[in-house]
Image (cartoon, grey):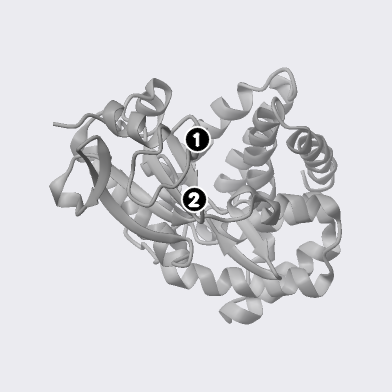
Amino acid sequence: MSTQADILAAFKEGRFIGSKELPVHIETLTSHVFLSGEAAYKVYKEDSTVFNENFSDLSDPAIRSDFIRTDFEWNHAANPATYIALKGAVIVDGQVIFVETGESAHWVIVMNRFDSRNELLRHLSAGTLTSADFGNMGSELARSLTKVVRLRPDIDLYKSFVTHLVDLRAWIGELSGEIPVEEGAVYVDYLETFIETHRSDITSSADASMVVDGHMGNMLLTDGTLSMIDIFPPKEDWRYSHRDVNVYRLATDIYALSGEEAFRAFLQGFEIASNRKLNKELEPFFVTYAASIMVPYLYVLGAKSELHMRAADQYHRFLREYFARVA
């Protein structure tokens, strides 16, 4: 019986159907990705201790299959042009053969390859987008969300926010070298107080929803068209929250890197396309919340990327200046 190690070794050596050359191998915390021609093949790790202990335990076959299947379903619904198929993988005569998922414990997400130059962060950093571009992006986000997101009135939003802010306090506290502990604590304290003082407005069951991991690092802008990638949150608790989190995660990225005019154009585009007005009284919460998640994330990536480090510094300045105005 094939093991994941067997599958990975075959991929690395180009021993799989459709391969004509050694693939480009990219390893992340959670997965191995193999790029070959116009295709990409994603294999989630079974043995990532950090991921298994802190997010979802993919060493458990039942949890792993549920996680990967749902990951594919969310991403395929949002972006079927990129996320093509979910397949099982077995070794036959030394080569990876793709089969139905019921025929193997080892699954592969088959994707069309995309150009990393179209990552939204690169467009925002270049500063070449117009207000019309941002308005169109807001409209496209609204339409994309309808393909994957569903309201979940059964979710207790108050408990959900409490859990999320516990995680956020730990997350932002890990970056004490870039974000002083006292500074990070002030942001989370503010968010906790906001929930208590606006509880009836921000925890209505009518707003409880599935939420995607929809920040600029998971967005592509290709010939003016916005598309989402890798939007499945790695932790179950993070998959449900207030529906406006889906809007303000990306809107705040735009605010931080492209300014308020771009931010307002994006929100207006979203409101028109969704035929729904956002509650602006809750905006300080969602902007502070989104920024407090994203600044540490960018600093982590910035350890190996000058682009991300520049964005982290700019975003951090934005967070400090914005918070000084609203707190």
Contact between labelled residues 2 and 1, with CB atoms less than 8 Å apart: no
Q: Nearer the viewer, residue 171 or 17?
A: 17
> Which quadrant would the C terminus be assigned to in this image?
top right
Image quadrant assignment for residue 191: top right
**Which residue: 34% across, 59% down?**
85
**Which residue: 28% across, 42% down?**
96
Helix, strand or loop at mark 2:
loop
Q: Position of residue 44 (x, y in %)?
A: 37, 37
Residue 205 in sight from this viewpoint: no
Q: Which residue is mark 2?
A: 230
Q: How many marks?
A: 2
Q: Nearer the viewer, residue 66 or 307?
A: 307
**Which residue: 83% across, 60% down?**
260
Q: Position of residue 167 (x, y in %)?
A: 50, 32
Q: Which residue is mark 1?
A: 25
- Eyeballing the image, is 77 above or below 288? below
Residue 61 in sight from this viewpoint: yes
Q: Position of residue 239 (x, y in %)?
A: 42, 49
Sequence-wise, the earlier of marks 1 and 2 is 1
User: Does residue 87 appear to the left or right of 22 in the view shown?
Assistant: left
Type of amino acid under label 1: His
Type of amino acid under label 2: Asp
Image quadrant assignment for residue 67: top left
Q: Nearer the viewer, residue 46 or 263?
A: 46
